[in-house]
């Protein structure tokens, strides 16, 4: 930029010199050229100084603006970096928490898997399956009726024929005593529902035979005329077996109905026991209602007797009151007679004195 301006000034100077050469004499050309050269150099120096100063000022101003803009950009970048770092830190913390929860869940799954394996090992033995069913039955009874309610139910109760029922319910008439026995036909059931087993139909027949065998045993052992009601409950502690029977084996349900044996699972047993509990409460409430009604009838008789005696006393009081009134009237009459007699005597005495 500076060189372009200098070039323009030189051109102007040359043009001026040519013009001067036309108007002045040759004798003054050298002098005037010298003066003009001096002025041009002076002007060029001043212009150069001003130009340098302006350029320096512009450069300083531009540098300051650039620094200001850079500082703003730096602040924004730092702010964005801080925000992103904070978000990243939160995300990282959340990821760590989730990983920790996943790790805990994995440990629980591992524990549950080992427990399931342990449970399967336990359930492979018939005796332990029986204990499992009894414990499950006890847990349900405790939840419905409360623990230790011997007036409502008893566990491992011996009947008059010598058989021991897993549980007996003592309910008021017309329900009576109801026996509950736990059965767990597992082996043939597992083989029957195993889709990889090609002999499922064979095991289905065996499963039905097991169920009917349990139904016959309960009907013959736990339904005793004169001691228990004419029905009993077969408890299946596995909800899956109960669902299988109700969904696909209606013949077993019909067979149990004929034998007066009601098949229940954990859920349906809770519902059945809850219904029995409501019936017991209603019967107890009706019993107390009868007692209250009887007492009210006795109170009504006593109140009638009290009313009769009060009426009699009222009549007696009314008679006495009438007698008292008559006596009072007679007393007034007698008093008036005495006053009259006394008046006559006083008058006689007065006449004699005169």
Image: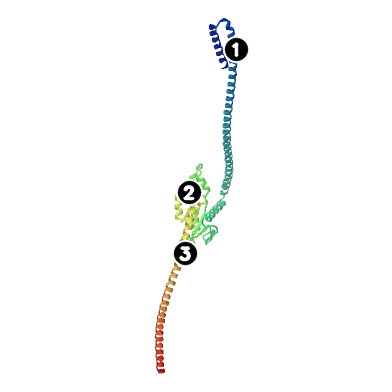
Kindly identify which numbered label has been placed on residue 50. Answer: none
How far from the left and from the top, in percent, is residue 7?
A: 56, 13
State how far apart marks 1 and 3 are (Cα): 139 Å
Q: Viewer-nearest of labels 2 and 1? A: 1
| Residue, disc 3 | 288
Q: Please rate how many residues cluster around mark 1, counting C-alpha atoms within 10 Å: few if below 14, some from 14 to 19, many from 20.
A: few
Q: Nearer the N terminus, badge 2 or badge 3?
A: 2
Image quarter where the N terminus lies is top right
Going 45% across and 52% down the picture, which residue do you hit?
A: 253
In front of the other: 329 or 11: 11
Q: Nearer the N terminus, badge 1 or badge 3?
A: 1
Residue 248 in view here: no
Q: Viewer-nearest of labels 1 and 3? A: 1
Q: Viewer-nearest of labels 2 and 3? A: 3
User: Which element type, helix, strand or loop, lies under badge 3?
Assistant: helix
| Residue, disc 2 | 243
User: Which element type, helix, strand or loop, lies under badge 1?
Assistant: helix
| Residue, disc 1 | 38
Q: Please rate how many residues cluster around mark 3, counting C-alpha atoms within 10 Å: few if below 14, some from 14 to 19, many from 20.
A: few
How far from the left and from the top, in percent, is residue 67?
A: 59, 27
Residue 189 in view here: yes
Report the side of 286 relative to 75 (left or right). Answer: left
Q: Nearer the N terminus, badge 2 or badge 1?
A: 1
Image quarter where the C terminus lies is bottom left
């Amino acid at each position: 930029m500076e060189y372009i301006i200098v070039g323009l000034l030189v051109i102007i100077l040359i043009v001026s010199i040519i013009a001067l050469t036309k108007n002045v004499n040759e004798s003054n050309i050298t002098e005037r050229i010298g003066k003009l050269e001096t002025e041009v150099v002076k002007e060029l120096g001043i212009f150069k100084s001003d130009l340098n100063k302006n350029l320096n000022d512009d450069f300083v101003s531009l540098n300051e603006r650039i620094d200001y803009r850079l500082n703003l950009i730096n602040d924004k970048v730092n702010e964005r970096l801080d925000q992103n770092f904070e978000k990243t830190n939160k995300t990282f913390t959340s990821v760590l928490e989730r990983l920790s929860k996943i790790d805990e869940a994995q440990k629980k799954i591992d524990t549950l898997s080992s427990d399931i394996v342990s449970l399967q090992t336990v359930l492979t033995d018939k005796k332990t399956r029986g204990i499992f069913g009894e414990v499950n039955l006890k847990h349900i009874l405790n939840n419905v009726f409360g623990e230790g309610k011997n007036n409502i139910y008893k566990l491992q109760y011996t009947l008059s024929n010598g058989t021991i029922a897993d549980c007996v319910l003592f309910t008021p008439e017309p329900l009576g005593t109801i026996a509950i026995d736990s059965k767990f036909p597992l082996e043939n059931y597992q083989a029957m529902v195993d889709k990889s087993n090609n002999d499922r139909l064979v095991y289905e027949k065996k499963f039905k035979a097991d169920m009917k065998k349990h139904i016959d045993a309960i009907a013959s052992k736990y339904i005793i005329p004169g001691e228990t009601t004419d029905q009993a409950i077969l408890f299946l502690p596995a909800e899956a077996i109960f669902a299988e029977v109700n969904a696909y084996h209606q013949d077993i349900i019909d067979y149990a109905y004929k034998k007066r044996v009601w098949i229940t699972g954990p859920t349906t047993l809770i519902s059945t026991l809850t219904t029995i509990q409501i019936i017991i409460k209603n019967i107890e409430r009706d019993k107390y209602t009868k007692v209250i009604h009887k007492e009210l009838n006795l109170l009504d008789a006593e109140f009638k007797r009290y009313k009769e005696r009060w009426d009699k006393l009222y009549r007696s009081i009314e008679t006495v009151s009438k007698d008292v009134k008559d006596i009072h009237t007679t007393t007034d009459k007698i008093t008036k007679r005495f006053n009259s007699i006394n008046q006559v005597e006083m008058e006689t005495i007065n006449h004699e004195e005169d």
